[in-house]
Amino acid sequence: MELVINHTKISKAECPMRIYLEDIEKVEKENNPAFEKGKVWHTLLEQFWQRIGTEEEVFDKKNERKLIKDKARKMFYNAESFAIHAVKQWNKVIRADFISRKKLDDIVNINHLSEEERKKIKKLKERVIIWNSKDEKYKITGHFNKNSRLLYDYFLEEGKPLDLEGNLIEPEREFNFKLRNAIKKGGEVIQTLIINGRIDQVRFVDGVLTLVDYKSGNPWRPANEAEFNYQLPLYVLGFLAKCKHDRDYAKRFGREKIIDGFLKSFFIDETIQVRYFMIEALSVRERANELLSAGIKPDFEIPEVTHTRKVTEENFYDLIDKMEGTRRNVVEGNIYKARGMRCNYCPVRRTCDSINTPKDRLPYTDKNGNRVFHFSEPPYRIEVQENPELHYMGRLEETSEEITNPPQKVIAWGGGKNVLRGRIPKILN
Ligand code: SF4
């Protein structure tokens, strides 16, 4: 058995429609502003303690070239200069988007495209940002300007993240581990466990080892807590995998004694906690404080900046069950949209928004314009009998309804290329 756990897999596990569109329909994936905004924040924050310096260091050009190479160049020295730095990083994204669009415009007008040009178009399309409104990019500029100032002060008050020996903890940027022979509860062996992702910050909070993830979207806690919970095990697995590969690293966090049990007797070290840091909550709270000090009661809920969660072994098994369950749903044709915060980052969102599912009670069409419906027995059975009084109208009366929950096929038909799909799509075999 091979198991891959990463952010994409987790997001897909939460939404059968995303699996269907990405893996079966293979619709074109699109880049979205929320995703780009998140990337800029992650880079800014993971470099925060390396990039902060004195005013002299920031303006010292002498060693600039060498320092850029070392990624040690000091970029800011106060809240104002951090905001300038943050906005600059965001402007780079706007510029890159502009260039990609221009390149795309130039290439799509070519008459007979070579294979290479087609590939280039595909790549450019994935890179171009689909803005939700004309002024969205400028609104995000304002978001960086405001929140980076507040974040700077927050970080300085919170202090550097230090390990048990008092050394600065470097951010665990991207991790990618391939682990062999992990044993699940009950003895089943996962021959290859692939874990990849990122941890924005590792720090001790009141003596508890805490893995921090910065969230740059909606600062209000999602109504559906599960959306948070499925992500929890990923960070702990990534951290423990790093400890297993690097004993010195494990020692810095006091994990050298327990790490041998990882994958043999446990997947999750339950003494570790995960913290979600809602960046935008800082500015919402500031706004609320301004209103309160002017004697006005805010007409919105004041969000918390951090949400800290314990992570348990159960969270890991819940995640696996969820991944398998959603996959099974898609195979059996039970495809529905699981709306939530995840939609902001979804690369197939526009396609998803443009189609209907059986749950919307409207015909659902695939990308070829074929109508799609669930075939075989209906998911319910209605017994009917004639009502003699209404006989002259030929009406029937419903008497009972029974859920049958039958296996189903997804059939695409009519309107487009008349594709007939088998019960188990190839990609999911
Ligand atoms: S937009 Fe939301 S509901 Fe639609 S496929 Fe993406 S994650 Fe699922």
Image: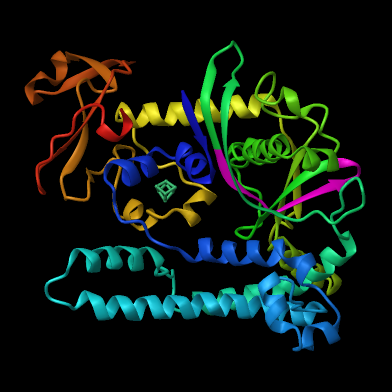
Tell me: residue 355, above or below residue 85.
above
Q: Residue at x 84, y 55 (%)?
A: 161
Q: Is residue 198 magenta?
A: yes
Tell me: residue 297, above or below residue 329.
below
Snapshot quadrant of residue 15:
top left
Q: Residue at x 35, y 58 (%)?
A: 350
Q: Is residue 100 magenta?
A: no
* Residue 381 x, y percent position in the rendering: 26, 17
Q: 124 and 117: which one is in front?
A: 117
Q: Please state, as top left, top right, bottom left or bottom right, where the C terminus lies in the image.
A: top left
Determine the main secondary structure of the stretch shown in magenta.
strand
* Residue 427 x, y percent position in the rendering: 30, 35
Q: Residue at x 14, y 23 (%)?
A: 395
* Residue 278 x, y percent position in the rendering: 70, 56
Q: 421 and 290: which one is in front?
A: 421
* Residue 238 x, y percent position in the rendering: 65, 40
Residue 288 visible somewhere in the drawing: no
- Report whether 176 appears left or right of 362: right
Snapshot quadrant of residue 146:
bottom right
Q: Residue at x 86, y 40 (%)?
A: 208
Q: 23 and 110: which one is in front?
A: 110
Bounds of the magenta segment: 195-208
- Report whether 175 appears left or right of 383: right
Q: 304 and 302: which one is in front?
A: 304
- Report whether 179 appears left or right of 15: right
Residue 77 visible somewhere in the drawing: yes
For the rendered model, the colour scheme is rainbow
